[in-house]
Amino acid sequence: MGAVEPAAGAQSGSDWIRENKMKELVSNSTTNISQARKAVEQLKMEAYMDRMKVSKAAADLLAYCDAHVGEDPLIIPVPASENPFREKKLFCTIL
């Protein structure tokens, strides 16, 4: 028995592997280009954002908290009669 010849137009195993690797490389480079474009767009958006110093943001946050301290239930607790999450007291009588 002799070696089996590939049919006309059929690829050998190494040709098939080589072709698939090339397709994968092209696909990966297309994906990389797409990801790079998205990153550039994101960086452009971030470059035009208005910036604020952390010290200014912290001062604004403190001022806001001071102005709204009366509305904060963690600082001024909700009265027990108005608290929907309080434990229900069940009375049990033993006969």
Image (cartoon, rainbow, N blue to C red):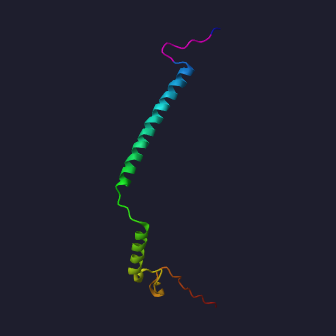
Residue 7 sits inside the magenta stretch: yes
Residue 18 sits inside the magenta stretch: no
The residue shown at (39%, 46%) is: 40
The residue lying toward the viewer, choosing from 68 and 74, is: 68
The residue shown at (48%, 86%) is: 80
Please, is residue 28 above or below residue 1 in the view?
below
Please, is residue 75 above or below residue 16 in the view?
below
Q: Position of residue 75 (x, y in %)?
A: 47, 82
The residue shown at (49%, 32%) is: 25
The residue lying toward the viewer, choosing from 29 and 10, is: 29
Work out which residue is located at the far top of the displayed protein and give it: 1
Please, is residue 81 above or below residue 41 in the view?
below
Q: Position of residue 34 (x, y in %)?
A: 41, 40
Task: Quarter of the image for the N terminus: give it.
Answer: top right
The residue shown at (34%, 55%) is: 48
Residues rendered magenta in the picture: 3-10
- Would residue 94 appear left or right of 78 to someone viewing this image? right
- Majority secondary structure of magenta residues: loop
Task: Quarter of the image for the C terminus: give it.
Answer: bottom right
- Would residue 69 appear left or right of 19 to someone viewing this image? left
Q: Position of residue 72 (x, y in %)?
A: 43, 80
